[in-house]
Image (cartoon, rainbow, N blue to C red):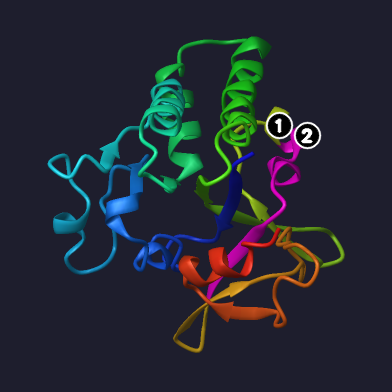
């Protein structure tokens, strides 16, 4: 069973930047937002020549790539999908003229299946999904932050339930951090994995902390 991690946060909170210390030789980056990465020199690290970068927002193609990499590229130890919202929005836009309930069921199934399949691959593979967040407010003023989804069908499914580790990226006084446990959010991590509520936003350190889980 492969390991699956979700990094969620607002735009500009450091989700992509947290991937900066991954080894490009053993990482495959799927850029679903098609916006490039956010650190100096990334184009030399991730590109078509190195066969470790794909800009694609079609969820079905992304699923095929993940499956192919998992089965045929043992040297790849980490796959990043950045962001899952890029896949959802692109699918929604491609089907914008469709009407009816089936459209939203298909959209929910597409994302759900992508995450579920991620767990079925080899043990030495880690798949990281990034996601945008939305903060809801109720009448009493209570705030709650969760993964942003398209359509009420995915809201009911609760995408976070498919992950054992969901870290919330945020900027605190100019420092980029991961929130490791729920604090008016759906952030969570395995018991005992992290001693602190907030840690530096370095996915490599996160993966080290989760090695025994």
Q: Quadrant of residue 122?
A: top right
Q: Is residue 55 left or right of residue 163?
A: left
The residue closer to the viewer here, 118 or 188, is: 118
In the image, residue 161 sits, relative to residue 121, either above or below, namely below
Residue stretch in magenta: 155-170
Q: Is residue 106 left or right of residue 159?
A: left
Disc 2 residue crowd, few under 14, some 14–19, many 20+, Cα 10 Å: few
Report if residue 163 lies within the magenta region: yes
Q: Secondary structure at mark 2?
A: helix
The residue closer to the viewer here, 202 or 133, is: 202
Q: CA distance from mark 2 to mark 1?
A: 6 Å
- Residue where numbered disc 1 is placed: 152
Report if residue 70 lies within the magenta region: no
Number of labelled discs? Answer: 2
Q: Quadrant of the C terminus?
A: bottom right
* Residue beneath the point at 42% across and 22% down: 64
Disc 1 residue crowd, few under 14, some 14–19, many 20+, Cα 10 Å: few
* Residue beneath the point at 45% across and 60% down: 11
Residue 127's x, y, as percent? Answer: 51, 45
Q: Nearer the viewer, mark 2 or mark 1?
A: 2
Q: Secondary structure at mark 1?
A: helix
Q: Quadrant of residue 102?
A: top right
Q: Are marks 2 and 1 in contact (CB under 8 Å)?
A: yes
The residue closer to the viewer here, 119 or 138, is: 119
Q: Quadrant of the N terminus?
A: top right
* Residue beneath the point at 47% across and 72% down: 202
The residue closer to the viewer here, 25 or 198, is: 25
Q: Which mark is residue 156?
A: 2
Of all residues, the one furthest to the bottom in this rendering is 173
* Residue beneath the point at 27% across and 49% down: 35
Residue 110's x, y, as percent? Answer: 57, 23
């Amino acid at each position: 069973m492969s390991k699956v991690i979700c990094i969620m946060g607002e735009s500009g909170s450091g989700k992509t930047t947290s991937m900066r210390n991954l080894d490009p030789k053993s990482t495959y980056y799927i850029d679903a937002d098609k916006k490039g990465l956010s650190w100096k020199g990334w184009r030399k690290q991730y590109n078509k020549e190195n066969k470790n970068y794909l800009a694609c927002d079609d969820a079905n193609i992304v699923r095929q790539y993940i499956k192919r990499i998992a089965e045929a590229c043992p040297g790849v130890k980490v796959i990043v999908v950045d962001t899952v919202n890029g896949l959802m929005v692109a699918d929604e836009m491609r089907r914008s003229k469709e009407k009816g309930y089936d459209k939203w069921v298909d959209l929910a199934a597409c994302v759900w299946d992508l995450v579920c399949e991620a767990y079925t691959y080899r043990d030495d593979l880690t798949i990281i999904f990034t996601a945008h967040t939305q903060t809801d407010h109720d009448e009493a003023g209570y705030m709650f932050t969760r993964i942003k989804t398209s359509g009420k069908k995915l809201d009911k499914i609760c995408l976070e339930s498919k992950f054992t580790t969901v870290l919330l990226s945020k900027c605190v006084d100019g420092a980029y951090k991961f929130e490791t446990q729920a604090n008016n959010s759906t952030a969570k991590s395995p018991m005992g994995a992290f001693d602190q509520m907030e840690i530096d936003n370095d996915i490599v350190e996160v993966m080290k902390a989760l090695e025994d889980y």
